[in-house]
């Protein structure tokens, strides 16, 4: 076991920025208004299980189709880059239709454990120890649970402009992380 506080903090921040649960509060509020109750506990637990499972089997799935982790990490850095651009510029490059129910599926996947999160997990796996990434996933899932449970209070407290500022700050952080992932993994490809 190779626990590292630095790796845990970095992986936690990467996943926090990618999951962007604070930026998703308007979506969560919309789902709650549309269908009533959101299953915070169930969504959080299932999202955590999906992320940890992908941490272990994601690389095997890639090897089955002939892709190495470094190539996936470089591709992931592009996904993170575009997610960051969306956050910073306030534009939407990809729009998924709003789900009709607020069951586990739209919350756990793809809102919490979506494509960006999966890409980040494998990109982190290329650089950090698994146990540190698992701790980072658990920290993020706890934070996601807290936010899901108190999304209305957070929205009232921060207001629309506060949520916008937080989203842009994490967008810039995510942009820097994307550049770092690209630089550290691209050298392994050539």
Image: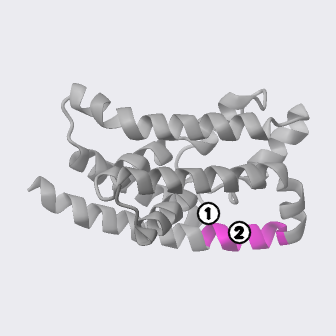
Instruction: Examine the image and state in which quarter residue 167 appears.
Output: bottom right
**Quadrant into which the N terminus falls:** bottom left
Residue 113 is left or right of residue 127, and the answer is right
Q: Please tell me the numbered disc located at residue 164.
A: 2
Q: Earlier in the sequence, mark 2 or mark 1?
A: 1
Residue 129 magenta-drawn? no
Kindly indicate whether the residue at mark 1 contacts the one at mark 2 (C-beta within 8 angstroms).
Answer: yes
Instruction: Examine the image and state in which quarter residue 32 appears.
Output: top right
Q: Is residue 117 above or below residue 164?
A: above
Residue nearer the viewer, 178 or 149: 149
Tell me which residue sits at (60%, 56%) in the image: 139
- Can residue 86 be seen from the camera position used here? no
| Magenta-colored span | 158-168
Residue 130 locus on image (x, y percent): 38, 50
Instruction: Examine the image and state in which quarter residue 156 appears.
Output: bottom right
Residue 131 locus on image (x, y percent): 42, 52
Element type at mark 1: loop
Dominant secondary structure of the residues highlighted in magenta in the image: helix
> Local crowd at mark 2 within 10 Å, few (<14), some, or many (≥20)?
some
Q: Please tell me the numbered disc located at residue 90.
A: 1
Tell me which residue sits at (83%, 37%) in the image: 38
Q: Residue furthest left?
A: 190
Residue nearer the viewer, 132 or 25: 132
């Amino acid at each position: 076991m190779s626990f590292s506080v630095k790796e845990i903090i970095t992986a936690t921040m990467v996943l926090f920025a990618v999951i962007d649960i604070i930026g998703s509060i308007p979506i969560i509020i919309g789902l709650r208004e549309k269908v009533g109750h959101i299953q915070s506990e169930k969504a959080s637990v299932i999202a955590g299980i999906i992320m940890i499972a992908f941490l272990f089997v994601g690389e095997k799935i890639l090897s089955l189709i002939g892709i190495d982790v470094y190539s996936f990490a470089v591709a992931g850095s592009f996904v993170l880059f575009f997610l960051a651009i969306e956050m910073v510029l306030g534009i939407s490059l990809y729009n998924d239709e709003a789900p009709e129910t607020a069951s586990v599926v739209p919350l756990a996947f793809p809102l919490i454990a979506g494509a960006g999160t999966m890409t980040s997990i494998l990109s982190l796996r290329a650089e950090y120890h698994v146990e540190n990434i698992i701790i980072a996933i658990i920290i993020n899932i706890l934070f996601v649970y807290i936010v899901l449970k108190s999304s209305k209070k957070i929205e009232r407290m921060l207001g629309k402009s506060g949520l916008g500022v937080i989203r842009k700050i994490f967008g810039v952080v995510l942009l820097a992380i994307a550049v770092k992932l690209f630089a550290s993994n691209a050298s392994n490809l050539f």
